[in-house]
Image: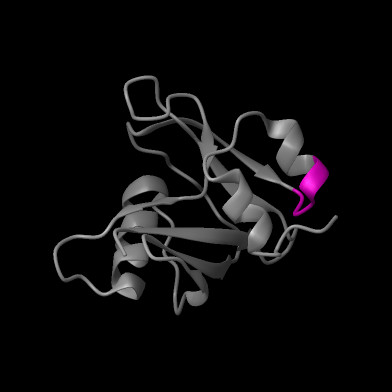
Amino acid sequence: MASVFCVIQDELTRQVLLLQRAQDTSRPCQYSLPGGRRKHIEPPDIAIIREVFEETKLTINGPKLIREWEDQAYFFANVHSPSVYINKESMAFVWINATVSQLQAVGEIMNYRRLLELQVFEL
């Protein structure tokens, strides 16, 4: 498994965080969950804590594994009163309601089909 991603939900609003990838990255302007590549032999749960902090400055504690595929792992974490500060890999961020219609309204989503399979977005 090379990549890790995290569904980050605001405890108060129940909204989910998406990042819009910067122009000079792979898949420019697409929205995605915070995450990225694991470092060599880095455990997935440590990798997602590091990636989320690098990309958003959010600290997540005890991310819960939702689903694993051969090449990716998806986690879930709640945050309280989040203040997001994006790095140069992203050009924007958005908090959305955890519904499929809101997910579709955002725009082009990286790994869209896999996000639907996580079953964290309501129909």
Left or right: residue 34 versus residue 94 is left
Residue at 63% in and 64% down? 118
Residue at 45% in and 68% down? 60
Task: Report the label total.
Answer: 0
Please check the rendered image and state whether residue 12 is part of the magenta-colored stretch, yes or no: no
User: Is residue 9 positioned above or below 96 on the image?
Assistant: below
Question: Which contiguous range is marked in magenta?
Answer: 97-101
Left or right: residue 34 versus residue 87 is right
Colour scheme in use: one colour
User: Is residue 78 positioned above or below 36 on the image?
Assistant: below
Which quadrant holds residue 77? Answer: bottom right
Residue extending farthest left: 40
Which quadrant holds residue 120? Answer: bottom right
Which quarter of the figure is the N terminus placed in?
bottom left
Q: Nearer the viewer, residue 41 or 91?
A: 41
Which quarter of the figure is the C terminus placed in?
bottom right
Residue 122 in the image, given as x and y percentages of width and height: 81, 59
Residue at 44% in and 75% down? 61
What secondary structure predominates along the stretch shown in magenta? loop
Left or right: residue 6 versus residue 37 is right
User: Is residue 99 positioned above or below 19 on the image?
Assistant: below
Residue 30 in the image, given as x and y percentages of width and height: 52, 30
Residue extending farthest front: 70
Residue 42 in the image, given as x and y percentages of width and height: 20, 70
Residue 74 in the image, given as x and y percentages of width and height: 49, 65
Residue extending farthest right: 123
Q: Nearer the viewer, residue 104 or 13?
A: 104
